[in-house]
Image: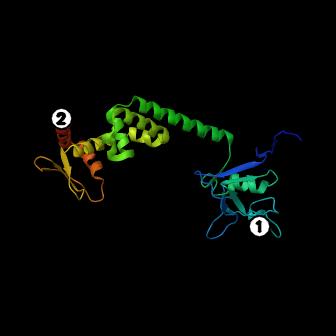
């Protein structure tokens, strides 16, 4: 048997193809639409003719376009098993429907492409390395601020070695979120506010609507309804008035 690639004039390669559900979905079985219906439109916009063309997978037809199917059709189903579908090269109509024309292609499912997979894996590896390097070089205050998003108030009881360890583990486990938090200046300011409350420098009212100085009960910030109180206080700290409050709290924290 020859292993020579079969390439059609339009560049389409005749070969077995594998498809997988996106988003790491792997249900035991999953059926996607194989014909056009009102509930599940299956249309392809032909830029040459400027028309929407109806799609239908018929096992006894060479084309997946209804307009090119003649005579009685035998309908086929498109079933993924454990998130995967293998389509042999003999089923060219189904392959082209899935790879080129199906409206769910690239969104709900994708064709397995070795180069694309390698690129995705390389991106993930580089993202993890970037996150770990950033975590390794991060000062303890920013590390504590980021970990507080992940672990909450228990960070207050952790030593510097524990914080560094858990920060690296967090960066490895979820590098994208870690990098997003590392680039968010409000994370540090929110942590600053939380520490000030925990140490009794300022207080937050039971209804989570008002920040006050702990000593004289003078109101600092009123939190709008449905807003995160610490995010609101962080925004306040970036104002001219808030900068003075920040300096005052910072002295007490030291």
- Residue 193 relative to residue 142: left or right: left
What is the count of numbered marks?
A: 2
Residue drawn at point x = 68 percent, y = 40 percent? 114
Residue with the mark numbered 1? 75
Whole-number angstrom distance, CA of label 2 to CA of label 1: 75 Å
- Residue 147 occupies quadrant: top left
Name the foreground residue: 235 vs 68: 235
Secondary structure category for the residue under label 1: loop
Badge 1: residue crowd in 10 Å (few <14, some 14–19, many ≥20): few
| Residue 71 position within the rendered picture, expressed as x and y whole percent measured from the top left | 83, 69
Residue drawn at point x = 77 percent, y = 56 percent? 93
Badge 2: residue crowd in 10 Å (few <14, some 14–19, many ≥20): few
Residue with the mark numbered 2? 251
- Residue 80 relative to residue 202: left or right: right
Task: Give the residue furthest to the left.
Answer: 216
Name the foreground residue: 216 vs 101: 216
| Residue 166 position within the rendered picture, expressed as x and y whole percent measured from the top left | 42, 38
For the N terminus, which image quadrant? top right
Considering only order in the chain, which callout, 1 or 2, is on the residue closer to the N terminus? Answer: 1
| Residue 155 position within the rendered picture, expressed as x and y whole percent measured from the top left | 33, 42
Secondary structure category for the residue under label 2: helix
The numbered disc on residue 65 is none
For the C terminus, which image quadrant? top left
| Residue 31 position within the rendered picture, expressed as x and y whole percent measured from the top left | 67, 62
- Asked if residue 50 shows in the view, the reply is no
Mark 2 touches mark 1? (CB < 8 Å): no
**In the image, is residue 87 above or below residue 243?**
below
């Amino acid at each position: 048997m020859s292993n020579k690639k079969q390439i059609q004039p339009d560049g389409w390669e005749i070969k077995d193809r594998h498809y997988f559900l996106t988003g790491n979905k792997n249900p035991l079985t999953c059926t996607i639409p194989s014909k056009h219906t009102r509930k599940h439109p299956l249309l392809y916009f032909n830029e040459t003719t400027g028309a929407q063309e109806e799609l239908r997978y018929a096992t006894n037809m060479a084309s997946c376009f209804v307009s090119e199917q003649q005579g009685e059709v035998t309908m086929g189903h498109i079933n993924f098993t454990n998130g995967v579908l293998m389509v042999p090269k003999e089923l060219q109509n189904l392959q082209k429907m899935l790879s080129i024309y199906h409206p769910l292609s690239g969104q709900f499912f994708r064709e397995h492409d070795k180069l694309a997979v390698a690129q995705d894996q390389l991106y993930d590896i580089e993202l993890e390395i970037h996150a770990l390097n950033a975590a390794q070089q991060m000062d303890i205050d920013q590390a504590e601020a980021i970990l507080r998003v992940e672990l909450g108030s228990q960070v207050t009881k952790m030593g510097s070695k524990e914080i560094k360890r858990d920060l690296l583990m967090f960066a490895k486990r979820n590098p994208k979120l870690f990098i997003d938090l590392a680039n968010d200046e409000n994370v540090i300011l929110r942590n600053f506010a939380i520490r000030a409350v925990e140490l009794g420098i300022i207080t937050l009212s039971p209804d989570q609507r008002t920040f006050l100085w702990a000593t004289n009960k003078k109101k600092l910030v009123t939190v709008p309804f449905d807003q995160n109180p610490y995010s609101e206080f962080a925004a306040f700290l970036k104002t001219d008035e808030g900068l003075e409050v920040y300096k005052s709290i910072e002295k007490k924290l030291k």
